[in-house]
Amino acid sequence: MKNTLSQSEFIDMWRGSDREDSFSYEGKIALFDMFEELEPDMEVDIVGIDCYYTESSILDVASEYGILEEIDIETEIEIEIDEVISKLITDQDEIKDMIVEHLESNTMVIRLNDETVIYQNY
């Protein structure tokens, strides 16, 4: 017998388990949507999902996997402080995009927002 889960039932499966906090609410929605699209008939195993996928800040995953050392990052420093601040903010966004691109070339990635991704562990 086969039972199809709704998004809310998928999210409810995590409640009360020791893996409840492994993914944010938004992360669970993104995972549900991905699985529904890629593998609609899969058997849901939250332990397996938790083992194979991780939700993390982009900068944390870059640090954990040493990605910053693997990609070439050049930064010019301007003398005007306002320009420096503006450039650092722009550079940080560009660096995050480079990190996500690097991750995508190695594994499956769901970008939740400008700061956070879910990636398949590799």
Image (tube, grey):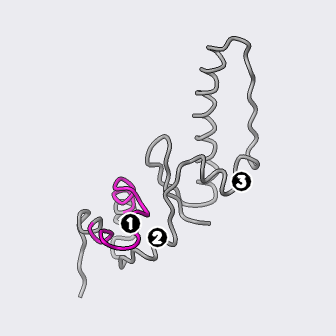
First-in-chain label (1 vs 3): 1
Residue in the picture at 51% in, 62% down: 54
Picture quarter with the C terminus: bottom right
Q: Is residue 121 above or below residue 92?
A: below
Residue in the picture at 25% in, 71% down: 5
Residue in the picture at 74% in, 28% down: 75
Q: Position of residue 67 (x, y in %)?
A: 69, 51
Residue type, mark 2 in image = Asp
Please state the extent of the stretch shown in magenta in the rendering: 12-31
Q: Which mark is residue 115?
A: none
Q: Is residue 105 above or below residue 76?
A: below
Q: Position of residue 70 (x, y in %)?
A: 75, 49
Query: Residue 43: which quarter of the image?
Result: bottom left
Residue type, mark 1 in image = Phe
Describe the element under mark 2 as helix, strand or loop: helix
Find disc 2 in the rendering and name its residue. 50
Residue type, mark 3 in image = Gly
Describe the element under mark 1 as helix, strand or loop: helix
Query: Residue 1: which quarter of the image?
Result: bottom left
Q: CA distance from mark 2 to mark 1?
A: 14 Å
| Residue 113 part of the magenta segment | no
| Residue 17 part of the magenta segment | yes
